[in-house]
Image: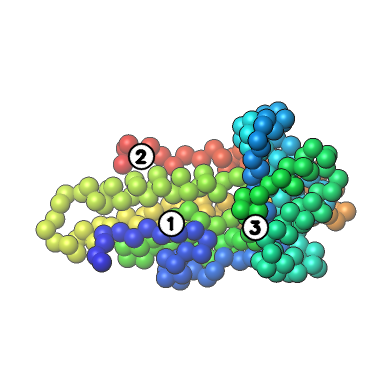
Amino acid sequence: MKIKVLIGCDGVNSVVAKWLGFKSPAFTERSAIRAFAEFEDDNGFESKELWFIRNGYRSAFIPCDDMTLYRFLHWVHSMKGRTEKSEIMENPSIMKQIALRKLNEIPDKVKATIQITEVDNIAFTTIRYRLPWDLIWGNISKGNECVAGDAFHPMTPYIGQGGCATFEDGVVLASCLAKALLSEKSEAEREEYERIELGLKKYSNERRWRGVELVTVAYMAGYIQNRTGVLISFLRDKFLAKLLTKVLRKLADYDCKDLNKA
């Protein structure tokens, strides 16, 4: 098979990222259960998110419509973390028991949505991220290959920018490749390859530090939110919450330029 450009958008376990020399994403000490419940009748919930935050875990229940509800649970591993993971791998139905055990203080009406969820509608994952220094020194592109999205900058979910960053990658990448592919046509295949290579290098340079910034802030946001020590709790509640809000707004206000001007 012969291709002009190979773009690795193959997720956190990217084969293309490994070929480019990236190490596997690092494991955090956090796990997540994501699920959605289906109801035969009206689920009885208003169109409002229900959040439950305690020391060591965060959970939300979000109605999608009158008949379905999405929920997630993120938690920091205790000493039993590895045991929980192995239990889940052996018996996925245990995900319900884990959720009910950690959320035993929530209202019964909300708890019932966990009990009615089909096992096939529940997913478990350990949360991983790309180490910032791997992004600084790693090859985002090589020749006519590159990575984008979670293959490029997998991050923890605490700033809500993973999907947004992937769209940003797409716009910048399309702009850089358009300039390479829409240049004056040349009979020499080598010249086109060199233009593509230069376009991907430009993409790498434009996105590298944005990726470092997002991955770092996402990790620190999760670290601050999930810690239970007296000092970090005091700093978070009194100072860091306001600071983090400003940082998140700034991160979301990113201009990846107009694709039509490429």
The residue type indicated by label 2 comes to: Leu
- Could you say whether the residue bearing mark 2 is in a helix, strand or loop? helix
Near mark 2 (Cα within 10 A), the count class, few <14, some 14-19 or many ≥20, is some
- Residue drawn at (41%, 59%) of the image: 8
Mark closer to the chain start, 2 or 1: 1
Assess whether mark 1 and mark 2 are in contact (beta carbons under 8 angstroms): no
Which numbered dot is residue 9?
A: 1
Query: Residue 75: percent from the left, percent from the top?
Result: 74, 55
Instruction: Check disc 3 and report the residue beneath it.
Output: 124
Mark closer to the chain start, 2 or 3: 3
Q: Residue 126: which quarter of the image?
A: bottom right
- Residue drawn at (32%, 37%) of the image: 261
Near mark 3 (Cα within 10 A), the count class, few <14, some 14-19 or many ≥20, is some
* Towards the viewer: 108 or 155: 108
Instruction: Check disc 2 and report the residue beneath it.
Output: 259
Query: Residue 160: percent from the left, percent from the top?
Result: 60, 45
- Could you say whether the residue bearing mark 1 is in a helix, strand or loop? loop
